Amino acid sequence: MNLKLTPLFVTLFLSIHSYASTSPIEISGQARVRGESKTNGDYNSTLADRNAFTASRFRLNFTARPTDSKGSVFFQPQFTKIWGQNKVAPVDGGATTSVQSSGALNDTVLDVHQAYIDYSILSKLSLRAGRQDLSFGDQLIVGGVDWHNVGRSFDAGMLTYKIDENYKAQFFSGKLVDQNITTSSNGDFDFLGLYFSSENLSFAKNLDFYVLDKADHRGTSDSDIYIFGTRIKSKINAFDYRFESTFQNGRVVSNKKRHGEYQYDLELGYQIVALKSRLALEYFDSTKDYDQVMPTAHKWLGYADQFSRRNIRGYAFHIQSNVVESVTLKVDYQLFERHNTEFGAYDFSGTSLGTVGTSKKIADELDFSVDYAVDQNLSLTAGHSIVMPKKYITDQNAQSKDNTSWSYLQMLVKF
């Protein structure tokens, strides 16, 4: 165990012990093991670029609710490990070194994914303070990235005001980077916003509005990306729809602030009840300097995670079927294009793929996944993706003409 966490675990133990006689301790969690393999991530088979690994993630959830108290505590330690990966260990003098942690006398550390306090200020107003997952709507803009082996958490405070059972407003303020802990600096990197959500309306199942600010004040000049968005989602008999649109002002690109950047994502679906299946068409578009904020990756723009939401538009066809009991089959086909052919497309990390040529066609992607619910706690999932480069990719490098292939196999237990 990480020695730095020892005081935290001691505090948790003492807290649980003090609550044990007056309140229940709820325990839940999940365990996940997944193997992944990707080849030709650069679309060039002549280079040795096969990546393959197996990763584990184990989470325990502890919730303590003191009797006759307006507060509760949630604590979620997390163990993550890529099999066979060395760990960083301290050595004398304060330095670090990489040491073997599998088949050797070194353990992998245990970290904390979430740890927060909930406090009911009033009957309709509550506060959550501490390390927490922030996920809103369909997580197109802000999400916890549950697919990732670690996931995303925020050091933040959030006020939630429940107007009634169908309406609520949430204000949050998170500290992404604090540079004023021991010395003075120009400023910090903060993330804050207001998210209003409603459900069960007469004309829609969900209707959300939000205003966000990515406030990076670490440099000599302040940089605030102001984000305004709306989301609507509902069903009409056998049909369903989803639409989300976002506008931005203030992103600094090449020392200039960009205004009027936007994205929108529209999906229309149809349920074939007799076949227990859903068919859907999707169209998405984002401008050349749009900041994709902090979405849940892997959920959007293809399972192979080859592209980011900037200067990209495209079409997608989705099929989901539950014809076989306990089995969910998904097939997705996506076509990616450049929004503006004078500027490049961007890879998953946000790096430009290049600006050569005038072709708008980036790539097509075909995704398959099948999920088998063995029982109410155990599921097995497998998937395979093929990304087929088009002329824009080959214009950047004539050798970049081979398909990218990505596969995974996962076991998940929840309790």
Image: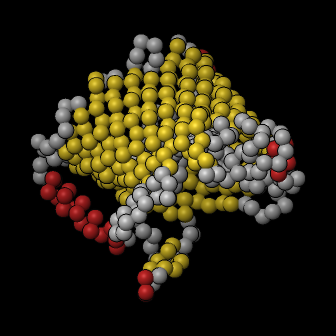
User: Residue at 54% of width from left, 73% of height from top?
Assistant: 86
User: Residue at 60% of width from left, 19% of height from top?
Assistant: 270
Kindly tell me whether residue 187 is visible in this rendering: yes
Quadrant (top left/top right/bottom left/bottom right) for the N terminus: bottom left
Direction from residue 196 to residue 290 in the image, left or right: right
User: Residue at 43% of width from left, 47% of height from top?
Assistant: 191
Q: Is residue 195 above or below residue 39?
A: above
Direction from residue 14 to residue 134 in the image, left or right: right
The quadrant holding residue 282 is top right
Residue 67 point in image, percent of width and height: 13, 44
Residue 308 point in image, percent of width and height: 64, 45
User: Residue at 35% of width from left, 49% of height from top?
Assistant: 156
Residue 9 point in image, percent of width and height: 28, 64
Q: Give the camera-side residue of 253 and 313.
A: 253
Q: Give the camera-side residue of 345 and 394.
A: 345
Q: Is residue 202 above or below residue 2?
A: above
